[in-house]
Image: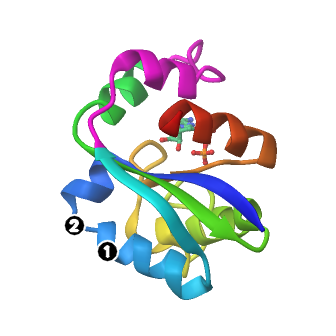
Amino acid sequence: MEQTYVMIKPDGVKRHLIGEIIKRIENKGYRIVKMEMRKLHKEIVREHYSHLTDKPFYPEIEEYIISGEVVCMIVEGERAVEGVRQLLGSTDGLLASPGTIRGDYATSKTYNLCHASDSTESAEIEIKRFFG
Ligand code: ADP
């Protein structure tokens, strides 16, 4: 059993896709063990995306993530880290495969609906970061 951190971003919430995203995660066989809707502060976003703070597009990402509520979740199951990343599809919504969440509902590189940890190490750090 493995746990991963999943976060529906403000565009997912605003577009009423919370149910659709959760449905796909649950239908695949994963379990949501913790969930909370929150509005994030800049500090935690900067920490979460510390690998991107030096990129020219970082200010846009920060603005995006703090622009509305997000849904924070811990998702559990067999190889959950890799499995949920597969469900999301690649970062750029336009290039993400049809059948994935981003592939079916996003056209943007930035506004791509949902985050999921990219490794078991990041999952552990992110779960601590968002749920203590
Ligand atoms: P992922 O979310 O797929 O793990 P990254 O960790 O590389 O991807 O990036 C974090 C988030 O930053 C992305 O989900 C997306 O919202 C935004 N982002 C990443 N790369 C770009 C880019 N080249 N231009 C604009 N926004 C980007």
Residue 56 in the figure: left or right of residue 117? left
- Identified at 32% across, 34% down, the residue is 64
Dot 1 amino acid type: Gly
Magenta-tinted stretch: 38-57
- Identified at 33% across, 22% down, the residue is 41
Residue 29 in the figure: left or right of residue 78? left
Does residue 24 sit above or below 84 in this rendering?
below
Are the two marked residues, 1 and 2, in contact with CB atoms closer than 8 angstroms?
yes
Residue 58 in view (yes/no): no
On the image, the x and y values in percent for residue 54 come to 59, 12
The image quadrant in which ligand 1 is located: top right
**Residue 43 forms part of the magenta stretch:** yes
**Residue 59 forms part of the magenta stretch:** no
On the image, the x and y values in percent for residue 30 come to 60, 76
Mark 2 packing: few (<14 Cα in 10 Å), some, or many (20+)?
few
Does residue 96 sit above or below 38 in this rendering?
below
What secondary structure is found at the residue carrying circle 1? helix
Query: Can you tell which mark lies on residue 16?
Result: 2
What secondary structure is found at the residue carrying circle 2? loop
- Identified at 49% across, 80% down, the residue is 24
Of 87 and 124, which appears nearest the observer?
124
Of 95 and 6, which appears nearest the observer?
6
Residue 36 in view (yes/no): yes
Structural distance between the alpha carbons of marks 1 and 2: 7 Å
- Identified at 71% across, 41% down, the residue is 124
**Colour pattern of the rendering:** rainbow
Magenta span dominant secondary structure: loop
Of 109 and 3, which appears nearest the observer?
3
Query: Can you tell which mark lies on residue 52?
Result: none
The residue to which callout 1 is attached is: 19
On the image, the x and y values in percent for residue 103 come to 51, 70
Is the residue indicated by label 2 positioned so its CB lies within 8 Å of ligand 1? no
